[in-house]
Image (tube, coloured by chain):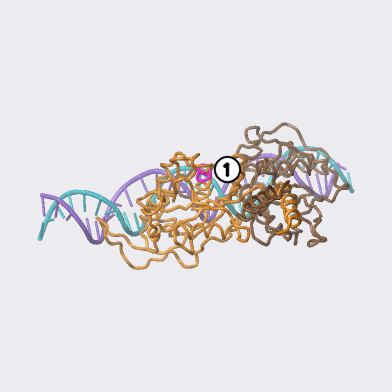
Chain colours: A orange, B brown, C purple, D cyan
Amino acid sequence: MTEREMRMKTAEIEKITHLDYFNIAISVDCVIFGYDDKELKVLLIKSDFKEFEGLYSLLGDLVKPDEDIESASYRVLKERTGMDDVYLEQVQAFGSVDRHPSGRVITIAYYSLIDIKHHKLQLSHNELSWQPVNDIRKLAFDHKIILDTSLIRLQQQVMDYPVVFNLLPEKFSLRELQELYEAILGVELDRRNFRKKMSIKEWLVDIDEMESDVPHRPGKLYKLKPEFRKKSGRKKAAPIKQMSL
Amino acid sequence: MTEREMRMKTAEIEKITHLDYFNIAISVDCVIFGYDDKELKVLLIKSDFKEFEGLYSLLGDLVKPDEDIESASYRVLKERTGMDDVYLEQVQAFGSVDRHPSGRVITIAYYSLIDIKHHKLQLSHNELSWQPVNDIRKLAFDHKIILDTSLIRLQQQVMDYPVVFNLLPEKFSLRELQELYEAILGVELDRRNFRKKMSIKEWLVDIDEMESDVPHRPGKLYKLKPEFRKKSGRKKAAPIKQMSL
DNA sequence: AATAAATATGTACTTAAAACACATTGATTT
DNA sequence: AAATCAATGTGTTTTAAGTACATATTTATT
């Protein structure tokens, strides 16, 4: 490279730099929900930032210039859980100036629902761990706020759409399903009313199998009707006759 | 600058450049809703991109490295409408690789509700115009998708929270309020049931004034109780006893 | 003074949510 | 083998909310 070329290159790069608009990095952060042991859990990793020593953080990565933000999330998921074809949905962007100690990083949060049992990730090898959502007090960065926001979003979605099934194995009993709803919503539900509503919704098919390995009378097993198996996808607002304010 | 210095600088900048992570610009786009003439409208500007000649686009700007993303939206709003203290809420980020013709730009969409009458913006001076949401077929960039997504979000919010009042003047009649709901939701509502639900909600106070300048029997005027005047702010998921699936 | 057009209000019907009780099945214990 | 335990599985009543619908009242206009 001649000195002239070098000078030109420097000038060119400085122009861009001084535009000041490319000094912001973009990341995605994934709130990966799982369900186990009657608890809603989230997959976390030990933070490797010295500012957050001892704290856990969500799984995230910077977005590459040639990938869609949703693709970036899927990539993070695939890298961390080994799983494809998972339920994923954007929550929102978080962009406070001071949210990241090493510079300006705006992040876009996604939440994802996976069947924790399918996911044979090597928890022992790395620093990943599933932690009960309700036990989490503090996370690195603004990740606690991101988690809280995502949980609220999940709670809202769960009331309107058949999404919880992504957290369960293919076959499940009504008790398991109810316990899952209770874990997500943080309320106790009446078994009889719950079953009635489920039968009204017509989301499930009775597969004519019974639970096994339960220390009591086994319940019937169900699975989600295939037409409701959406891995994300746009959800329309419900149609309205009168206003359900 | 010596050659050595220059070489170092080039190397340093190239390192950053090659990190490849600062080659993404971030913008905010505001879907500014207004209500006039019994129609829901949105504030648009003629696109100055030759790729989108003749098309309109949302109002947006790049986010500066030292401003929060929400501040950036407020700035755009203030610059374009002259209004402070408006209702503003994030919708989501849009980040397809090819969404912007001049490079990689990820945008964060906000929607905002303003009283169109309060806003004395110089529509004639510039290229701004209020356009009926239902008439819009095509916009620059991916702005039509952003608009559609924002409208769906608005429709959902309106069913749960008292936000529509940001689109109305301080004093309004129940008919005006109902027409506004109808315009947003795109449905006809029963007047008697609408009033009943409004009285149940207890959002309004009767201010003991009557409409004027209407070519028929004037109706009573109401205003929103001050405790519901939130300019945005977090909305919790509704508490649940049983599940309203 | 009569008419038109909107405001204002109330009642019956239907559907969904909430509270609640008992019989049944299979595993475990005696 | 019988009794007990713990869960499954179903149905009814009560209450609240959503929906459909009709008539009287007030003001501006003719």
Position of residue A39 measured from the top left corner of the image (x, y, whole percent) = 38, 49
Q: Is residue A176 magenta?
A: no
Q: How many marks?
A: 1
Q: Residue at point 74% right, 57% down? A: A5
Measured from the top left, where is residue A131 in percent x and y?
40, 47
Q: Residues within 10 Å of mark 1 (few under 14, many from 20)?
A: few
Is C7 in front, or is B45? B45
Against B229, is A185 above or below? below
Is residue A237 among the parts visible in the rendering?
yes
Q: Amino acid at mark 1?
A: Ser
Helix, strand or loop at disc 1?
Answer: loop
Specify whether A92 is left or right of B147.
left
Q: Position of residue D12 (x, y in %)?
A: 38, 52
Instruction: Using the image, name the chain to which the residue with label 1 belongs.
Output: A
Instruction: State the predominant SS element of the stretch in magenta.
Output: helix
Q: Is residue C25 left or right of residue A64?
A: left
Q: In this orientation, does residue B30 appear?
A: no
Give the magenta part as a residue range.
A143-148
Q: Position of residue A207 (x, y in %)?
A: 37, 68
What residue is disc 1 on?
A102
Choose between A212 and B2: the one closer to the eye.
Answer: B2
User: Is A119 above or below relative to C3?
Assistant: below
Say whether residue B146 is left or right of residue A139: right
* Towards the viewer: A176 or A189: A176
